Amino acid sequence: MSALFGRSEPVVFAGAESRDPFAYRFYDPDRVVLGKRLEDLLRPAVCYWHSFGYDGLDPFGGRTMSLPWAGGTIADFRRKADAVFEFLRLLGVPWFTFHDRDIAPEGASLAEYERNVREMAGYLGEGMARTGKRVLWGTANLFYDRRFMAGAATNPDPDVFAYGATQVKTAIEVTHQLGGENYVVWGGREGYETLLNTDLGRELDQLGRFIALLVEHKHRIGFKGTILIEPKPQEPTKHQYDFDVATVYGFLCRYGLQDEVKVNIEAAHAVLAGHSFEHEIAMATALGVFGSIDINRNDDQSGWDTDQFPTNPAQLVMPFYELLRGGGFTTGGLNFDARIRRQSIDPRDVLLGHIGGLDGCAKAAIAAAAMIEDGALQRFVDERYAGWDSAEARAMLSGKESLEAIAARLGRKPVEPQPRSGQQEYLENLLLRYQ
Ligand code: XLS
Ligand code: CA
Ligand code: CA
């Protein structure tokens, strides 16, 4: 079994000076950061699809790796589940995430699919009881099969809507059965390629009802976890409806779901939407819908969602600052939605990817915690807005003063606002202190 990933010894923390590539240099799960064990602060998770499903396929060529559990039978999926638990043991990570299709064979019919998923959920449950590993979130894959090529919830064919709804019902039920902390919806095909064949308003209404059905079902079965929408602007669909955090929030408000659903923010998707990752986290926090994170990075030049491991702490310090400043995770966590490269065919490469990713995040989180504890950045921001602390200023926002009343104020007491420096250079230099 241990040969699956080329070693049998678990990865342990060895300190920043360590030269052992199979040791953590920054991720010490027991280190206390902002009053919590680092493991509890980061809540790291391994994803089923990239870590145990990627075999090197790209648009120009086939497999470069042969996965020992490849094949479509229940026995193969059991071997794959065993590999997941072995990997989590080696890495010392408590959480995992999955799609319905990742854990079980699809089968020849919807009924067979459902039987397979429930059978494999039982098998995973036994493994979890034996190992203490846990589900951060589950989801349904509504994008791979050709039946979903024009979307699931937003499909012009109501039978496809019903098919997707059945999968989502099964997936949330097994997520609940396995004690999952969240349920994710990513609408990779919920969007359109051309307006020439699309009724956009109708599709949005379909999506709104689809999410509402999921929320209703969550309450019906007593699932206490959080439902999360994962924004992404495009890829695979040209225009995806869940473009970014702000768009998702507007959608939730339109369909009355803003108190029921939060967001799962992926680093790579934030960049595809033309934002920074920290912007998306700060926006979600400000709107009260921050839920969880899919951590990875894009290649700086390619402009694709390349899902690489996040090994650059300098890029991660601001996202972690925004995450921790916003209060950190409740039900969410840090899901490594990242995969090894096509030429990484040594079975240890997937282990090394996660070690570097977790170390990069730990280093950034420790730096972000120092920024918070030091307080210099927050003091600057507080000071910048201090004018709003006066009762007179606050009255303008109270909803009781009209535009006329505000204009009359300045008439009574002539004011000439004095612009002040935003001091971005000073602040950027300050940031260097912590990195
Ligand atoms: C694809 C998404 C997907 C979701 C789960 O780009 O990241 O993997 O996280 O369906
Ligand atoms: Ca993702
Ligand atoms: Ca992605």
Image: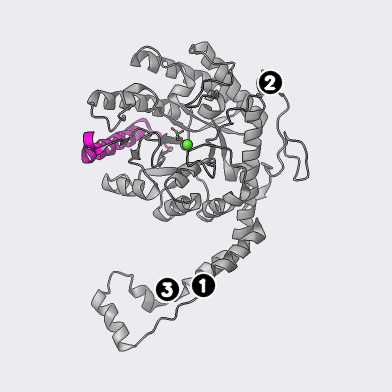
Q: Position of residue 307 (x, y in %)?
A: 52, 36
Checking the image for residue 383, the label placed there is 1
Badge 1 marks a residue whose secondary structure is helix
Q: Which residue is mark 2?
A: 2
Q: Residue at x 32, y 45 (%)?
A: 252
The answer to whether 251 is drawn above or below residue 185 in the figure is below
CA separation, marks 2 and 3?
60 Å
Q: Which residue is mark 3?
A: 388
Q: Position of residue 240 (x, y in %)?
A: 34, 39
Badge 3 marks a residue whose secondary structure is helix
Q: Which residues are magenta?
A: 195-224
Q: Earlier in the sequence, mark 2 or mark 1?
A: 2
Amino acid type of the residue that numbered disc 2 sits on in the rendered structure? Ser
Quarter holding the N terminus is: top right
Badge 2 marks a residue whose secondary structure is helix
Q: Quadrant of residue 43?
A: top right
The answer to whether 286 is drawn above or below residue 293 in the figure is below
In the image, is 399 to the left or to the right of 118?
left
